[in-house]
Image (cartoon, rainbow, N blue to C red):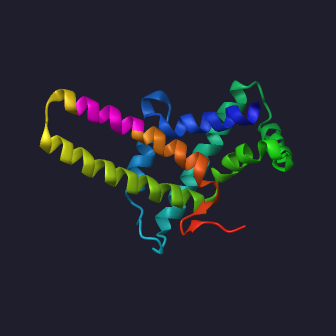
Amino acid sequence: QLLHRAVGHLYRKIIQPKEEGGWLEWFEDNCLKFNVQKKSEHGLFYTELHKEYEGMVENALVEFSASEGITDHDELYMRIFRATDDKKFESTVNLLLAAADYKKFVALMKRKKRTLLKKEKIGQQQLRANSTPTTVKERDFAMQRAREDEMQHSLSEGEGETEEGPSRK
């Protein structure tokens, strides 16, 4: 189904490193700028980063449209919006629409920062305990897997979450 492939395309962009055409480093570099306290003030750079992210998502959807043979980007958007009323595609459509939502973006960046800080602390403890090259390789592999798990969790579970916590409907 087209919508599932579009979400998959965006998800791959989020978790893949730059050399594979992804945005992983962008997320890791920029999430460190976010204050992870629940009721923190939003700096102007939050909005600037969100606008940059919106542009990245827009470009990724244009790229996806072209790969699917859709020459008119508006056609993809119309398919997305037509599917919003279809319960079968509600979750998928929400993931696509959430990609451009400011509050969800801020919540994602804060979660990403907390995860990176936690992994960094664990990685430092492991390195102090045993710093053989095998351990470093295992740690790097484990950190990559954890990044992928976190992004999958963020995309699938964060639909109704804002920076203050789950939204009430």
Could you tell me residue 16's position as x and y percent?
47, 34
Residue 167 horizontal side relative to residue 88, left or right: left
| Residue 87 position in % (x across, y down) | 82, 47
Quadrant showing the C terminus: bottom right
From the top left corner, tell me how far across and down residue 19 is, in percent.
43, 29
Q: Quadrant of residue 69?
A: top right
- Residue appearing at x 42%, y 41% in the figure: 147
Indicate the quadrant containing the N terminus: top left, top right, bottom left or bottom right. top right
Along the viewing direction, whichever of 165 and 27 lies nearer the viewer: 165
In percent of the image, x 17 and y 28: which residue is there?
133
In front here: 34 or 118?
118
Q: Does the magenta portion include 97?
A: no
Name the residue at 33% across, 32% down: 141
Tally of numbered discs: 0
**What's the magenta bit mostly, secondary-structure-wise?**
helix
Left or right, residue 77 beside residue 109: right
| Residue 141, magenta (yes or no) | yes
**Residue 95 rendering spot, x and y as whole percentages:** 66, 47
Q: Is residue 7 at least partly visible in the picture?
A: yes
Start and end of the magenta stretch?
A: 136-145
Of 105 and 64, the residue lying toward us: 105
113 w.r.t. 2: above or below: below
